[in-house]
């Protein structure tokens, strides 16, 4: 390797190191340090696990945490169920002339800000909203119902927001699935159910895993959709973090919560990768 | 099941219906938002009272359209500035990172690669608070040890730029890397055999090849920055970006001005996304 090459390495690696060290590594370390510091009996900051004790002793905190985790898994699963047939239709069923057009059409709405999409659902679903207007006009209802601010609506909103991140990897694995495999299975007497579970799903597993990881992570860390569409007693854990930081100004407690959320998201992603024998490096490609 | 296998009519009709319903689900909220931007009403709801452009060009006292709405116009401008700096810096560092991981070899490369991917699995809210904490720690350090008051370490414009840069750079790296993988290294070797330096080779050969992906990375990072909410929420000060500003208005009740802004955003992003799709086609 000549001298010019080493200079190249140095020029390329410096900005990357500065970026990762100053904006990713050190902030995460700082957050972990903040999380294990709290006021002691004399009102001084010192090492303590008090922040984590608060988390486990106050039901509102750990319940919100568990609720967020369970709902995120549910949203990930529902997103997969809804988008898989669509991805299959676009790549395998529809005539290839419309394939490109339909792909663009499915991806386009997700370039629009999440806030605009949530707002669209709000004006559709709220008490004075468009759906209620039509239900009353058509005589199905005689007085408007509030369709917003409940868990079902929140889950629907989260699924809606996440669909893109499941669709993209699914479209790309299905694109590479050889039609002959399906045809062979069909000729050998397979039906829709057996072909789906024995051929298509196993083949698509890498895409399903990478889609699920991204969807899960984004749902867990979502703030907008649960905040604007969820009910008043349907808190999301990111809202607890926000409250600690901005409303109570208790940064140590907030850091502990942030740390727990990070552990949860890494743990579930790690388990998902282990169960399906995938690696993170491969999954993001 | 697939194109060349005949299927029962009910099956294929049912499949078509499902996909049709999916598209209705997909576009309903956007369509309704756009339509109600032109309704002559004080609230973004039906009944339809007739077509109006007041929520765009209206100049009060009853209806103030977006083009006369100082606060919203200001936040759009802030978002443009943030997105400008984020897309330039992310694409620049992301291109460096792509060269680093695709063309160089060094100890602990795998570790650094995983670190580069980390922002993809760290929730945006966590990135936001950790950067807020760390900048505060640095700020306190500089103030007590050196008596320096550094504005950069307080929530505000530049901290928002840094927060968004921290994860958008990963996306930019992946976009540029994907194309760099397909680069034929013999082209670089040929240029260097003909007497070009490494720097000249990159400038005239490799970057030319990478151009579509660099344009793609610029467009994607611009859009991601423009609509980012989670990370920005913790780093923003009085200069709110558009998503933050809209969030505050939506939370506390809304007027059709928000629909008008949404129409502009939907139009703008569609044009940018389609242009990006067109220009970054691999065969161009």
Image (cartoon, coloured by chain):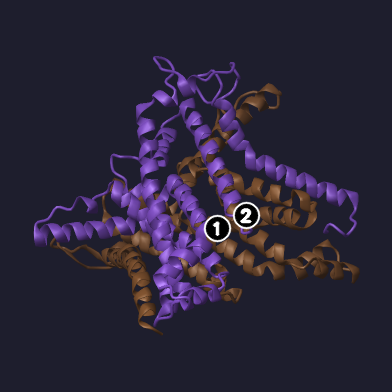
Chain colours: A brown, B purple
Quarter of the image that includes the C terminus of chain A = bottom right
Residue in the picture at 78% in, 44% down: B17
Label 1 crowd (10 A; few <14 / some 14-19 / many >=20): many
Q: Residue furthest front?
A: B194
Quadrant assignment for the N terminus of chain A: bottom left
Disc 2 and disc 1 in contact, CB within 8 angstroms: yes
The image's mark for residue B179 is: none
Chain letter of disc 2 in the image: A
Q: Who's the residue at 53% across and 44% down the image?
A: B272
Which one is nearer the viewer's eye here, A1 or A176?
A1
Q: Residues within 10 Å of mark 2 (few under 14, many from 20)?
A: many
Is the same chain shared between marks 2 and 1? yes
Q: Is residue A130 above or below residue A160?
A: above
- The vertical placement of B166 against B182, above or below, is above
- For disc 1, the chain is A
* Residue B72 visible in this rendered orientation of the protein: yes
Residue A189 left/right relative to B129 = right
Q: Position of residue B270 (x, y in %)?
A: 56, 41
Who comes first in sequence, dot 2 or dot 1?
2
Q: Is residue B115 left or right of residue A277?
A: left
Which residue carries the number 1 mark?
A215
Which disc is residue A79 wearing?
Answer: 2
* Residue A148 visible: no
Residue A226 image offset from top left, x and y in percent: 48, 46
Image point (49%, 19%), residue name: B54
Q: Nearer the viewer, residue B19 or B180?
A: B180
Q: How many marks?
A: 2
Nearer-the-camera pick, B26 or B47? B26
Where, by quadrant of the figure, is residue A6 drawn?
bottom left
Left or right: B71 with respect to A170? left
Q: CA distance from mark 2 to mark 1?
A: 8 Å
């Amino acid at each position: 390797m000549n001298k010019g090459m080493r200079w190249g390495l140095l020029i390329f690696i410096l900005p990357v190191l500065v970026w990762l060290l100053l904006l990713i590594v050190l902030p995460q370390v700082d957050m972990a340090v903040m999380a294990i510091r709290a006021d002691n009996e004399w009102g001084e900051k010192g090492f303590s696990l008090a922040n984590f004790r608060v988390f486990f002793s106050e039901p509102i905190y750990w319940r919100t945490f568990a609720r967020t985790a369970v709902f995120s898994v549910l949203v990930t699963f529902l997103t997969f169920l809804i988008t898989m047939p669509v991805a299959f239709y676009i790549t395998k069923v529809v005539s290839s002339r419309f394939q490109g057009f339909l792909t663009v059409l499915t991806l386009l709405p997700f370039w629009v800000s999440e806030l605009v999409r949530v707002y669209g659902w709000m004006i559709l679903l709220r008490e004075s909203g468009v759906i209620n207007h039509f239900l009353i006009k058509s005589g199905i209802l005689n007085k408007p119902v509030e369709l917003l601010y409940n868990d079902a609506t929140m889950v629907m909103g989260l699924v809606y927001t996440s669909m893109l991140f499941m669709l993209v990897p699914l479209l790309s694995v299905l694109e590479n699935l050889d039609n002959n495999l399906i045809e062979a299975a069909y000729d050998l007497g397979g039906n829709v159910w057996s072909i789906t579970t024995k051929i298509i799903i196993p083949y698509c597993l890498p895409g399903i895993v990478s889609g699920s990881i991204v969807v899960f992570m984004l749902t867990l860390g979502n703030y907008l959709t649960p905040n604007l569409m969820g009910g008043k007693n349907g808190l999301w854990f990111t809202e607890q973090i926000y409250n600690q930081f901005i409303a109570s100004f208790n940064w140590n407690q907030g850091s502990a919560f942030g740390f727990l959320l990070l552990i949860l998201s890494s743990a579930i992603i790690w388990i998902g990768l282990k169960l399906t024998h995938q690696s993170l490096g491969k999954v993001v490609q | 099941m697939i194109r060349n296998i005949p299927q029962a009519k009910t099956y294929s009709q049912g499949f078509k219906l499902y996909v049709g319903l999916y598209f209705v689900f997909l576009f309903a909220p956007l369509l309704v938002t756009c339509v109600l931007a032109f309704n002559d009403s004080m609230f973004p709801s039906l009944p339809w009272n007739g077509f109006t452009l007041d929520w765009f060009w209206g100049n009060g006292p009853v209806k103030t359209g977006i083009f006369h709405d100082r606060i919203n116009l200001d936040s759009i401008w802030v978002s443009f500035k943030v997105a400008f700096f984020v897309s330039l810096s992310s694409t620049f560092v992301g291109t460096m990172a792509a060269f680093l991981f695709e063309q160089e070899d060094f100890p602990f490369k795998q570790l650094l690669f995983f670190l580069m991917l980390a922002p993809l699995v760290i929730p945006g809210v966590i990135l936001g608070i950790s950067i807020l904490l760390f900048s505060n720690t640095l700020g306190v350090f500089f103030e007590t040890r050196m008596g320096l008051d550094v504005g950069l370490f307080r929530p505000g414009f530049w901290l928002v730029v840094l927060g968004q840069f921290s994860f958008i750079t990963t996306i930019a790296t992946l976009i540029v890397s994907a194309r760099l993988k397909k680069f034929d290294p013999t082209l670089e070797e040929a240029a260097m055999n003909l007497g070009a330096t490494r720097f000249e080779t990159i400038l005239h050969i490799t970057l030319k090849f990478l151009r579509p992906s660099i344009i793609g990375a610029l467009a994607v990072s611009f859009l991601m920055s423009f609509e980012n909410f989670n990370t920005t929420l913790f780093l923003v000060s009085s200069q709110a970006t558009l998503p933050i500003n809209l969030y505050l208005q939506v939370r506390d009740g809304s007027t059709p001005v928000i629909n008008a802004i949404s129409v502009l955003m939907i139009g703008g992003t569609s044009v940018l996304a389609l242009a990006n799709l067109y220009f970054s086609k691999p065969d161009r």
